Amino acid sequence: MSARTRLTPEARREQLLELGVRMLATRSLEELSIDALAEEAGISRGLLYHYFRTKADFHEAVVERAAADVVRLTAPSGDPDPLVRLLSSVRAYVDYVETNQAGYTSLVQRAAGGNDRLREIYETTRAALTDRIFDAASPEDLVALGLVDDAATRLMVRGWGALVEDVVLAWVRAPAGISKDELITLVTNALVGLLPRP
Amino acid sequence: MSARTRLTPEARREQLLELGVRMLATRSLEELSIDALAEEAGISRGLLYHYFRTKADFHEAVVERAAADVVRLTAPSGDPDPLVRLLSSVRAYVDYVETNQAGYTSLVQRAAGGNDRLREIYETTRAALTDRIFDAASPEDLVALGLVDDAATRLMVRGWGALVEDVVLAWVRAPAGISKDELITLVTNALVGLLPRP
DNA sequence: GAGGCGTACTGAACAGCGGTCAATAGCGCT
DNA sequence: AGCGCTATTGACCGCTGTTCAGTACGCCTC
């Protein structure tokens, strides 16, 4: 049962991570066993432990990679108008979720329901997705959106992130009744509407 | 290693479910192993299979029980004013999450990140928590809240549920900056604010 | 209160999976 | 060509879910 092929550590690690992300779209995290991964990659179980200290470490690396892909592929436009930038960001997110439905659904479910480290990655990623919308904004822009930097607003922006994720995933599963454009304006307007009134 | 105690099926099943719910507060679902459960209950591993066909079945039953507890313990008041009823419902929910922090956090994370059946229980439960706020409402009440029964509104109410869960859990973990009353009015007002404008 | 019966309960045995480690063999380098 | 480094293997261990044939507890009857 030989035909060993000896790769450089980088190439092998890359192959395993990429394969892991692909497999995550169809299996759950627990079903992503060392056995299954090793067989699919054509290597022995033991080799995985040459690259990842433990199975949880491997899962972490896979989720981290997948999360980074999401952030990278949904970058907002550089438009100066904060509302336009917000809209473009939401549109990019909806587009991504639409085309990567299985993978993204699995990613969210596994990361949010996993151990502490996985949830930390999940939280960080979602924070990054919302924060960057405002990072590039000037103080006047923030005022234009009705945003103030206080605890209540920060909490509700966080909650808006949860809302968008939930609503978009539900819409992708069953796009009943409303079009994509309606969905996008709906959740975008929601952000302004749900903020605490000064 | 005897000292067998023979209980009625109902009593034993009840004991196992209750113990499962209690243990879920400190362990994750995977860590809630048959071994641990059996040892804690003072029974053999085999007995669990007398009451539950498989480990997943047991986990399902535990989550179902815990979810039912949440719904039961957060029942809204019978106030005729829909806005008052909404407020009381949100307050009951916040109170519950506050006093059952560990258990509820675990429940949400495990159920939302579990298999299809577990997620179905989770979705059904969250739908029940939001739906009942409006079930008792008359058509005029709904208009008073700005609610119309269309696809967009249903989608956003669903999203509001996700927002409340996320925000309340975040606040309970770190109640930085805002009081409980502020939190309650914040998320309650958010529902009205985030709905699509006619 | 003795015996019998249904079934709640046990414990040994098996399979599958995560994890370890000494042995092996592919590839670059001289 | 051959040598050394290390990527790679495969056999092994322990733990966990699951099965099942057997055991003994408690109720019921006399």
Image: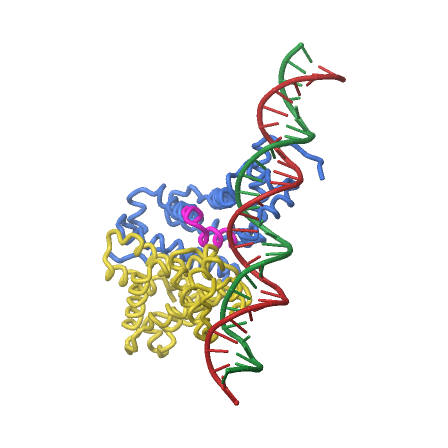
Chain colours: A yellow, B blue, C red, D green
Residue drawn at (39%, 44%) of the image: B132
Q: Quadrant of residue A41?
A: bottom left
Position above or below: B114 against A91: above
The stretch of residues the image draws in magenta is: B105-120
Position above or below: B33 against A106: above
x then y, percent, for residue B66: 51, 45
x then y, percent, for residue B119: 42, 49
Q: Is residue A25 visible?
A: yes
> Foreground: A6 or B54?
A6
- Magenta residues, dominant SS class: helix
> Foreground: A90 or A71?
A71
Is residue B9 in the magenta section? no
x then y, percent, for residue B17: 55, 41
Q: Quadrant of residue B14?
A: top right
x then y, percent, for residue B159: 36, 55
Residue drawn at (56%, 36%) of the image: B13
Position above or below: B68 against A51: above
Quadrant holding the C terminus of chain B: bottom left
Decide if residue B2 is on the left or right side of residue A117.
right
> Foreground: A113 or A36?
A36
Decide if residue A130 is on the left or right side of residue A1.
left
Q: Is residue B97 visible?
A: no
Residue drawn at (23%, 62%) of the image: A181
> Foreground: C12 or A163?
C12
Decide if residue B46 is on the left or right side of residue A10.
right
Quadrant holding the N terminus of chain B: top right
Q: How many marks?
A: 0
